[in-house]
Image (cartoon, helix red, strand yellow):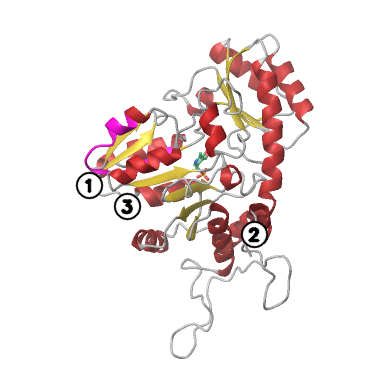
Amino acid sequence: MNLKFDTLAVHAGAEPDVATGAVAPPIHLSTTFVHNPQGGQPGAFSYQRDDNPTQQRLESALAALEGGTCALAYASGMAAIAAVLDHLQRGERVVLPQDCYVGLRAFASEVLPGRGVEVVAIDTTDLDAVRSACTQGLALLWVESPSNPCLRVSDIAELARIAHAHGALCVCDNTFATPVLQRPLQLGADIVMHSTTKYFGGHSDVLGGALVFARDDARHAAIRQRRLLSGAILSPFSAWLTLRGCRSLPARMALHCANARQLATALAATPAVARVHYPGLAEHPGHALAERQMRDFGAMLSIELQGGYDAAANAVRKVRVFTNATSLGGCESLIEHRAAAEGEHSQSPPGLLRLSVGLEDAGDLIADLQQALAGA
Ligand code: PLP
């Protein structure tokens, strides 16, 4: 049966337990599994770091939701990022977005040059700039759309075509959109990366990451083998919590998106706000593209205040419903002054506040920001 996305989200990897009939997926915490006298295993498992039943359930759900053939779960989103970047070889080139998750940028600038990998950061919304940066030696084009923290929208299908014309891989961080809103593998990307810490977990209580692969090929096998050797595995309990999050993901995303739309519209009419970065607003430069490649516009947005750094610092002190904290994708709304959080080397605009819009009442969220921004 060709199941629709919302049905898959509830059922993929969450089949009733054959051994007990339990309807809710069980957690298997065992680190080791029985050998038979010949040395093989009667079951499919040997040792938790290699593979385990709870992780396998999560990986099959992630692959089904992203429309991939297989997936690998990791201890964090950064472990998943590192798993891809660790495979770059001396002399190869990687092209990254200028606006991207700060940890990706740090890994690329602190680790890769020492390994002889050339790193080029460009505006991936500018396809001509991408074409000029994608020269000989290109091994990987990294896409993050919408991007963190400025919500830039890049053309995933076109970027995948450019990467493939050079025989390179196109990897897309789909953390902000989730497969509910955007399916990069269908647009031509080779690997989708997630911080499952965010919307998949959905409750700000479980760290995790994932790679979902378009093809079960030698690259997938090599990255899988490296995970076994590096031990960057997700714990079964974290896998279980994340699988639980998958099941309500479409329902949560619908409310997240509806709240964000209302908030973005209200903020666009607030005098203290100089700019709202939200792809759902018609005036956003990536709006038409987002309409084409996304099902909805997500629940992350950022605003730049007329009053700059001091106004932003003041606003995060005054919020009452929003919580001043990093991260995103939980039930509760979060606000973060990126320049303050990132410190002196921050590349974020000084007066930028990043919002993760949660599941509270939209009117309460709007009222909270309006009181926090009054006089800013
Ligand atoms: N990608 C994006 C877009 C993120 O926002 C984050 C974390 O905030 C990561 C990757 C890294 O994920 P983690 O914190 O799970 O290591």
Q: Residues within 10 Å of mark 2 (few under 14, many from 20)?
A: few
Name the residue type under label 1. Answer: Arg
What is the quadrant of residue 273 in the picture?
top right
The answer to whether any part of residue 12 appears in the image is yes
Q: How far apart are the alpha carbons under marks 3 and 2?
A: 35 Å
Query: Would you say the residues marked 3 and 2 are in contact, meaning their CB atoms lie under 8 Å apart?
Result: no
Q: What residue span does the magenta drawing correspond to?
A: 129-143
The percent position of residue 108, horizontal first and vertical second, equals: 35, 39
Kind of residue at badge 3? His
Asked whether the residues under the numbered discs 1 and 3 touch, taking CB atoms below 8 Å apart as contact, a structural biologist would say: no
In the image, 16 versus 310, the foreground residue is: 16
Q: Residue at x 42, y 59 (%)?
A: 215
In the image: residue 236, left or right of residue 166: right
Q: Secondary structure at mark 3?
A: loop
Can you identify the residue that label 2 sits on? 3
Calculate the distance from the C-alpha at mark 1 to the C-alpha at mark 2. Answer: 44 Å
Disc on the earlier residue, 1 or 2: 2
| Residue 375, horizontal then vertical, whole percent | 68, 8
Q: Is residue 355 above or below residue 195?
A: above
Q: Front-most of 200 and 217?
A: 217
For this orientation, the residue located farthest to the bottom is: 37
Q: Which residue is mark 3?
A: 87
Residue at screen point 49% across, 56% down:
68
Amino acid type at circle 2 is: Leu
Q: Which residue is mark 1?
A: 90
Q: Secondary structure at mark 2?
A: loop
